[in-house]
């Protein structure tokens, strides 16, 4: 690598300079010469304070992580024979999860001969949706996965 396109500390292009000359210029200004683009046809180097550069970059990454919203997946399990009061307890738990911004996976487990009554499972799911529907949207409609009927609920997205 003989020549590099040099950028000074303010971001202005100095031009195409030999690497030895670029190193001397950076050393004279008490800066580091950092290779920004390793393209063999057009290498780009920049004069910067590398310690300050890495510190500011990690600071930006920390701020981005702080602003990012983490959503968890919570699960509520039901059965075909779950009574009304127990269903209401599960509904309140799902509402609490949804208000915290988490997605909810609602699962009905079919045991033995209950597999013959899958239409009742869809009815239980529809009833569950009616009870929590004012604070969430159905992310994935109820569907059978083996012996389980699964549905996903998500809090309303803020638009």
Image (cartoon, rainbow, N blue to C red):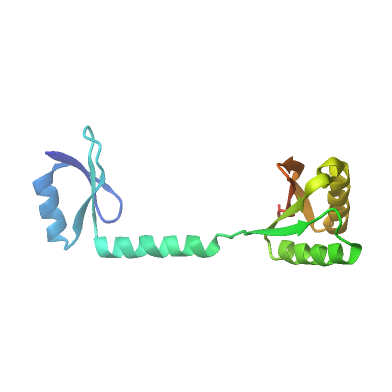
Return the x and y of residue 139 as percentages of the image width and height.
73, 47
Residue 136 occupies quadrant: bottom right
In the depicted view, which residue is nearer to us: 5 or 89?
89
Q: Nearer the viewer, residue 74 or 100?
A: 74
Residue 49 appears in the figure: no
Residue at the extreme front:
112
From the viewer's perspective, is residue 55 above or below residue 45?
A: below
Residue drawn at x 86%, y 65% as measured from the top left: 88
- Above or below, 8 relative to 3: below
Q: Give the total of numbered labels.
A: 0
In the rendered structure, the answer to whether residue 79 lies left or right of residue 102 reads: right
**Which quadrant holds the N terminus?**
top left
- Nearer to me, 69 or 132: 132
Where is residue 95? Give x, y as percent.
78, 63
Question: Residue 110: where, in percent of width, then height?
Answer: 78, 49
The residue at 81%/43% (across/down) is 115
In the image, 61 versus 115, the foreground residue is 115
Q: Position of residue 150 (x, y in %)?
A: 73, 47
Residue at the limit of the structure toward the right, as seen here: 84
Instruction: Using the rendered image of the protein, determine whether residue 10 is visible from the camera's viewpoint.
Output: yes
Residue at 24 percent across and 52 percent down: it is: 8
- Picture residue at 84% right of the left edge, 47% below the top: 121
Find residue 93 and report its image quarter. bottom right
């Amino acid at each position: 690598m003989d020549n590099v396109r040099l950028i000074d500390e303010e971001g202005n292009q100095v031009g195409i300079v030999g690497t030895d000359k670029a190193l001397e210029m950076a050393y004279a200004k008490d800066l580091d010469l950092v290779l920004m683009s390793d393209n063999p046809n057009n290498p780009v180097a920049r004069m910067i304070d590398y310690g300050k550069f890495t510190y500011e970059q990690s600071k930006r990454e920390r701020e981005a992580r702080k602003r990012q919203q983490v959503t968890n997946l919570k699960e509520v399990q039901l059965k075909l024979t779950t009574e009304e009061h127990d269903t209401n307890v599960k509904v309140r738990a799902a509402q609490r999860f949804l208000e915290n911004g988490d997605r909810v996976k609602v699962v009905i487990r079919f045991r033995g001969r209950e597999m013959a009554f899958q239409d009742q499972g869809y009815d239980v799911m529809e009833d569950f949706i009616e009870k929590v529907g004012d604070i969430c949207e159905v992310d994935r409609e109820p569907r059978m996965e083996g012996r389980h009927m699964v549905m996903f609920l998500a809090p309303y997205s803020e638009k």
